[in-house]
Image (tube, rainbow, N blue to C red):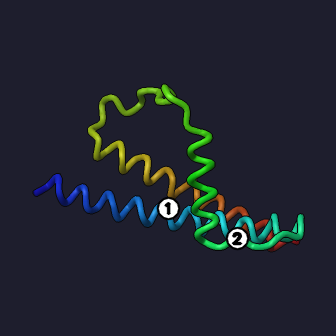
Amino acid sequence: MKNFAQLGISVIIVIVSFAFNALVFTALWRWFVVFAFNVQPLSLIQALGISFFWEYLMRRPGDEDGRFNDLNVWEAFLSGASRGFRFNFIAFLVGYLITLFQ
């Protein structure tokens, strides 16, 4: 039962993480790319697709550095998810602060 609950929570975290990533990407695109290059704003679905594509291009086989060897899978997943949320939040915050000075 514990593994089933962890799987359910993992699926929810992945969906929320992808949605938050697309939301941040859409906002940064609107603030900087639309303004600088006079292009159309991205929809949330387009931002999600570009994020998936970028992640696909950046992942290389054997890229893992083994830093999660002493963690179980659940702890490694939560660590990676929290790192992704922090990065997106900081990128959104810095982008917002930059737009205040335009």
User: Of 44 and 67, which appears nearest the observer?
Assistant: 44
The crowd level at tag 2 (other Cα within 10 Å; few <14, some 14-19, many 20+) is: some
User: Based on the displayed image, in which of its 4 quarters is residue 43 positioned?
Assistant: bottom right
The amino acid type, in three-letter code, at marker 1 is Phe
User: Residue at the spot x=79%, y=66% of the render?
Assistant: 98
31 with respect to 24 (left or right): right
Q: Which mark is residue 86?
A: none
Distance between the alpha carbons at the discs numbered 2 and 1: 15 Å
User: Residue at the spot x=28%, y=46% of the render?
Assistant: 74
User: Residue at the spot x=59%, y=60% of the render?
Assistant: 49
Residue 40 coordinates in the image, percent (x, y)? 79, 73
Of the numbered discs 2 and 1, the one sitting upstream in the chain is 1
Q: Is residue 27 above or below residue 81?
A: below
Give the labeled residue for mark 1: 18
2 with respect to 41 (left or right): left
The amino acid type, in three-letter code, at marker 2 is Leu
Q: Is residue 20 above or below residue 75?
A: below
* Element at label 1: helix
Residue 16 coordinates in the image, percent (x, y)? 44, 66
Does the CB distance between marks 2 and 1 fall below 8 Å? no
User: Of 43 and 29, which appears nearest the observer?
Assistant: 43
User: Based on the displayed image, in which of its 4 quarters is residue 88 positioned?
Assistant: bottom right
Give the labeled residue for mark 2: 42
